[in-house]
């Protein structure tokens, strides 16, 4: 088994199936996916060399109506249901991973 080093200090998992059902659902026009807005708001880039990770996963199995499921890697016991059109600044404020930095 090989191990790859990563610079990630934390991670956020976002359900891709929920995002697809909403056709984006966020941003000014309601067409931008939550993952993209979170990466922009946090200044995160893709890849293991970034400081933090925002990853879109296939399906988390909750499937709420008009919302996206999100898991903060620092608090895996607390899953968040982010309603379509929610303010991304408020979503970022609820992430414990980024509250300390």
Image (cartoon, grey):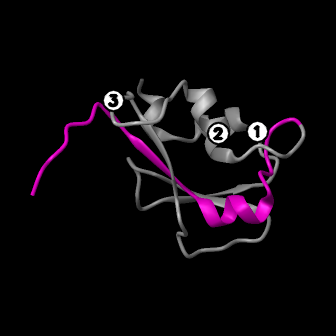
Q: Which label number is shown at residue 16?
A: none
The boundaries of the magenta stretch are: 1-28
Q: Residues within 10 Å of mark 1 (few under 14, many from 20)?
A: some
What secondary structure is marked by label 3? loop
What distance separates the C-alpha of mark 2 from that of mark 1? 13 Å
Disc 2 and disc 3 in contact, CB within 8 angstroms = no
Residue depicted at x 12% and y 51%: 2
What secondary structure is marked by label 2? helix
Residue depicted at x 68% and y 64%: 18
- Residue labelled with disc 3: 49
Residue 66 in the image: state x and y as whole percent: 79, 64
Of residues 11 and 16, the one nearer the viewer is: 16
Residue 58 in the image: state x and y as whole percent: 53, 66
Q: Quadrant of the N terminus?
A: bottom left
Exactly how many numbered labels are in the figure?
Answer: 3
- Residue labelled with disc 2: 36
Of residues 95 and 12, the one nearer the viewer is: 12
Disc 2 or 3, which lies upstream in sequence?
2
Disc 3 and disc 1 in contact, CB within 8 angstroms = no
Tell me if residue 30 comes above or below residue 16 in the rendering.
Answer: above
What secondary structure is marked by label 1? loop
Q: Quadrant of residue 7?
A: top left
Q: Nearer the viewer, mark 3 or mark 1?
A: 3
Q: Residue furthest front?
A: 2
- Residue labelled with disc 1: 87
Of residues 67 and 22, the one nearer the viewer is: 22
Residue 30 in the image: state x and y as whole percent: 86, 45
What distance separates the C-alpha of mark 3 from that of mark 1? 28 Å
Residue depicted at x 61% and y 60%: 16
Of residues 95 and 35, the one nearer the viewer is: 35
Residue depicted at x 62% and y 28%: 41
Residue 91 in the image: state x and y as whole percent: 64, 41
């Amino acid at each position: 088994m090989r191990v790859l080093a990563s610079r990630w200090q934390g991670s956020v998992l976002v359900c891709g199936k929920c995002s697809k059902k909403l056709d984006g659902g966020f941003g000014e026009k309601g067409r931008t996916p939550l993952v993209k807005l979170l990466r922009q708001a946090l200044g995160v880039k893709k890849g293991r060399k970034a400081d933090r990770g925002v990853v879109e996963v296939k399906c988390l199995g909750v499937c709420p109506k008009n919302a996206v499921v999100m898991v903060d890697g620092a608090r895996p016991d607390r899953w968040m249901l982010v309603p379509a059109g929610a303010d991304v600044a408020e979503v970022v404020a609820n992430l414990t991973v980024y509250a300390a930095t």
